[in-house]
Amino acid sequence: MKKRLYGLIILAFLPLICQLIADHFQSYGIGLILRILSHIIIPVIAVAYITKISFKESFFLPIHLKNKKQTFQLALIGSLGATAIILTAFFSLKHLIDLTAISTNLATINITPITYPLIALAIVLINPFIEEYFWRGFVFRVFDKYTKFGYWTGILFALHHVIIIAGWFNWWQFILVTVFLALVGILFNWTYKKTNSIYATWITHLIADLVIVTIGYFYIFQ
């Protein structure tokens, strides 16, 4: 069992490898395909193999909606909180953010004013699900079951994201964003533990991404 657990721990770092590959090819499309592979397909196969259940059962484990009332209460609180924090942070620190550098960085992976709306739509509709499925429904669930460090996988969630935003901020802003993302990851882990499904964090993540891509549209590409 320990060998299988070690294998699952290694899988927690698979998205980082996929992100580096996507960065090498400078393609959002390749990155999206690799994220679906690393965040959903491989974890489903791994869980089915280890627990001896069907692929269908393995896939649906993190998305059974059980406590509907509590789930949507936490989703509402999380969504409102995420919106308030993102908007407050952006408008408070906007003068410190190099929007031109972000635009240039996005252009290197073929995200331009023309392609941005389609990619933004994919980010909002696809990205939150696959990330919450992986980080909460797979990584946190496995670590929480077999180790004492389940909540701290929020740090891995943060490290995965800072690879994407590297170069967007100066050093102290970068550290601040990293710490914030780690806290978000830990809070999302707690939410999953309370609801035993990804729905609350999925909805919160979706709203947060919607706010971010909307800001990007009006302030980076306009």
Image (cartoon, rainbow, N blue to C red):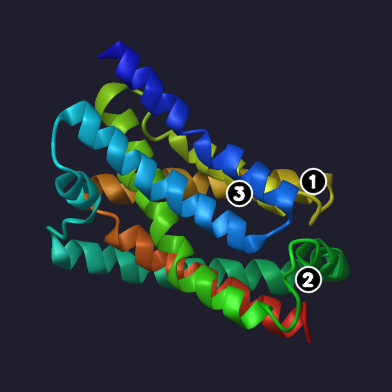
Kindly indicate the quadrant of the structure image that contains residue 77. Answer: bottom left
Q: Is residue 99 above or below residue 22?
A: below
Residue assigned mark 2:
94
Residue assigned mark 3:
161
The residue at 54%/59% (across/down) is 32
The residue at 16%/67% (across/down) is 69
Q: Residues within 10 Å of mark 1 (few under 14, many from 20)?
A: few
Q: Is residue 29 above or below residue 9?
A: below
Q: Position of residue 142 (x, y in %)?
A: 30, 32
Asked if the residues shown at circle 2 and circle 3 are in contact, with their CB atoms under 8 angstroms apart, the answer is: no
Mark identifier at residue 172: 1
Q: Is residue 25 above or below residue 111?
A: above
Give the mark nearest the N terminus, 2 or 1: 2
Q: Secondary structure at mark 3?
A: helix
Q: CA distance from mark 2 to mark 3?
A: 20 Å
Q: Position of residue 126 (x, y in %)?
A: 44, 66
- Residue placed most toward the observer, 105 or 186: 105
Q: Quadrant of the C terminus?
A: bottom right
Three-letter amino acid code at the position of disc 1:
Trp
Asked if the residues shown at circle 2 and circle 1 are in contact, with their CB atoms under 8 angstroms apart, the answer is: no
Kindly indicate the quadrant of the structure image that contains residue 158. Answer: top right
The residue at 66%/66% (across/down) is 89
Q: How many marks?
A: 3
Three-letter amino acid code at the position of disc 3:
His
Judge depth for marks 2 and 3 and give the one in front.
3
Q: Secondary structure at mark 2?
A: helix
Give the mark nearest the N terminus, 1 or 3: 3
Q: Position of residue 31 (x, y in %)?
A: 59, 55
